[in-house]
Image (tube, grey):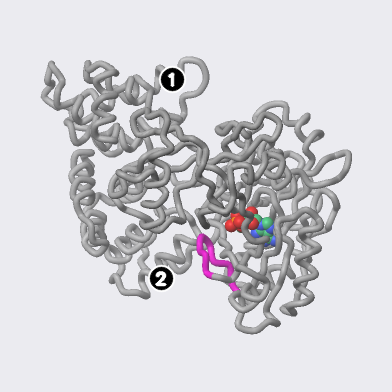
Amino acid sequence: MEYGALVDLYEDLETTDADTALIEQLATALSEADPETVPLLVTLLQGRPFVAWEDCDLGVSSSLTRTAIAKATGQSEDQIEDWWRETGDLGSAAAKAVENERQQTLFGQSLTVEQVQETLEQIAAYEGTGSQGRKVDAIAGLLSDADPATAKYLVRTVLGHLRIGVGEGVIRDAIAEAFLSGTEADVGVVERAYQVTNDYRVVVQTARTEGRDGLAELEVAIGRPIDVMLAEKAESIETGIERVAAEPEAVLAEFKYDGVRAQIHVDGGEVQMFTRRLTDVTTQFPDIVEAVSENVNAERAILEGEIVGYNPETGEMVPFQVLSKRIKRKNNIEAAIETIPVTLYLFDAMYVEESLLESRLEDRLAVLESVLTEQPPAIERAENRRTGNRSELETFYQDALDAGQEGLMLKNAEATYQPGSRVGYMMKVKPTLETLDLVVVRATYSEGRRSNQLGRLYLGCRNEETGEFEEVGRLSTGFTDEELAIVTERLEPLIHETDGRDVTLEPKLVLEVEFEELQGSPEYDSGYAMRFPRFVDFRDDLSVRGVDTLERVEDIYHSQ
Ligand code: AMP
């Protein structure tokens, strides 16, 4: 297939808003494409040359792409940077660079979709010294014969951001429309096929050649990670019990551990491990591989659990930030195993010798427990209680918090596994939000509709030793339009320096802010940042001396 034909399709899709029209266009394109190109088409239409869980990353930054555009078109990098700024899109800047090329080539050589894919695979494979240069050359090579529209979409593809509005749901519906009859039931069949394979290339090919029956026969495969089931948040144990299951007898509660979700695939003697984002992290965790090999008695399995790090001296659990060092670690893994040992707490089984996706949670767990030999502290079943009794659960919740864990997971023991969905079969209960009273020290005017409003506020806590205010993050949500107008009205007289859209303020206006948690952050001078902060109220009853102290911020951070 000519890449130009795909570019035409991208352009049509980009200018189409309604989902139904998008689906129509896509379905026509899929049914008219050559059979060999169809799988490639579905991945390229999602703006990435690989499926989410393939261990392939192009490793191409914006600046590297800018260099490649300059090289292919003879435009200066500064000029490209200006166009980028003007349009807000490096793809559009590339189109302008091609348009303004002094020596217009005849856009002669036509590129095929397969050639583009091949080059992208090569780019992903370049590693080590000289690889950046080779990536630039390869991208410049693609761009050298491109017309402006082609350049635009090539650049967006290498950056992984197509901006044409085609999401997974649109692809699903288009496959059902193109190769089945497009009914609601057909959409359901395609959806299930995608859930078990997590790969639209397989789904589209099966739909094309074997139709409904072929799709219905697709199954989970070891080595191909499943999209994980997601949790919803409950405000309290009581609402969690009500929402997770119709009958309290169906409630199963587990500790909600503060670690990293792991999906473990066992295939004979081989063990592979994926994160929640489905990245393969097997090499970083040889200790988990060993614990699973020795203590899970199954030939073929897909299990799920949470990895939690602990302090080897005290045995106490370490915060997620410490554990995350092990995920990033590529060298000297043996030393990391010693300093940050981990426990795997298993909480689900999606496959043990056969697929368990259609089995009820209690049955999946019975299978899990039958193949697992617990070996603390390396590998254990997650702490759990089979009860929907509120007071028993309140006690269990307290136990979880006392153990330094995040809270509880309430699950419906009768529900099947729902890959990739947030359907209320799993509710998390965590302590309610924290609040702080902080002073606005800096602000930025918003963009767009609220451009005359100071919509981004940087908030400070008080360092009692120095008397200075130190920033703990920025706030831009939770206000009504009226409240934001009041904030702006009250802040403008306090401005003592303006730099473009940024202003520095006399610290006077005190606000109450709620947030999910505090994270360590090098971005702010206090060393901390609030996660998901929201405006609660003005604190005119407090003077700046009443602003919360850095000490309190540190206390909250350590108690989380
Ligand atoms: P959240 O990230 O707050 O949406 O909570 C969901 C995450 O909690 C999951 O992705 C898991 O990583 C984690 N988790 C910890 N303990 C459990 C458990 N017992 N069951 C399920 N998920 C758990």
The quadrant where residue 21 appears: bottom left
Residue 192 can be seen in this image: yes
The foreground one among 405 and 214 is: 405
Residue shown at 57% from the left, 33% from the top: 524
Residue shown at 42% from the left, 49% from the top: 487
Relative to residue 427, is residue 29 depicted above or below? above
Task: Locate residue 38 relative to residue 105 in the image: left or right.
Answer: right
Residue sitting farthest toward the bottom: 247
Residue 209 can be seen in this image: no
- In the rendered image, residue 267 lying in the magenta stretch gets the answer no
Task: Locate residue 51 relative to residue 247 in the image: left or right.
Answer: left
Q: Give the range drawn in magenta.
A: 415-423
The foreground one among 444 and 125 is: 444
Q: How many labels does the image show?
A: 2
Q: Mainly helix, strand or loop, the magenta region?
A: loop
Badge 2: how crowded within 10 Å, few (<14), some, or many (20+)? Answer: some
Task: Locate residue 433 relative to residue 87 in the image: left or right.
Answer: right
Q: Name the residue under label 2.
A: 188
Which amino acid lies under the numbered mark 2 shown in the image of this protein? Gly
Residue shown at 19% from the left, 45% from the top: 11
Q: Where is residue 219 in the image (x, y as percent from the top left)?
A: 52, 62
Relative to residue 83, is residue 324 depicted above or below? below
Q: Position of residue 379 (x, y in %)?
A: 79, 52
- Ligand 1 shows up in the quarter that is bottom right
Q: Nearer the viewer, mark 2 or mark 1?
A: 1
Question: Does the closest atom of ligand 1 sit within 8 Å of the Cβ of label 2?
Answer: no
The disc placed on residue 328 is none
Q: Position of residue 517 (x, y in %)?
A: 62, 50
The disc placed on residue 132 is 1
- Indicate the quadrant containing the N terminus: top left, top right, bottom left or bottom right: top left
Q: Where is residue 23 in the image (x, y as percent from the top left)?
A: 26, 61
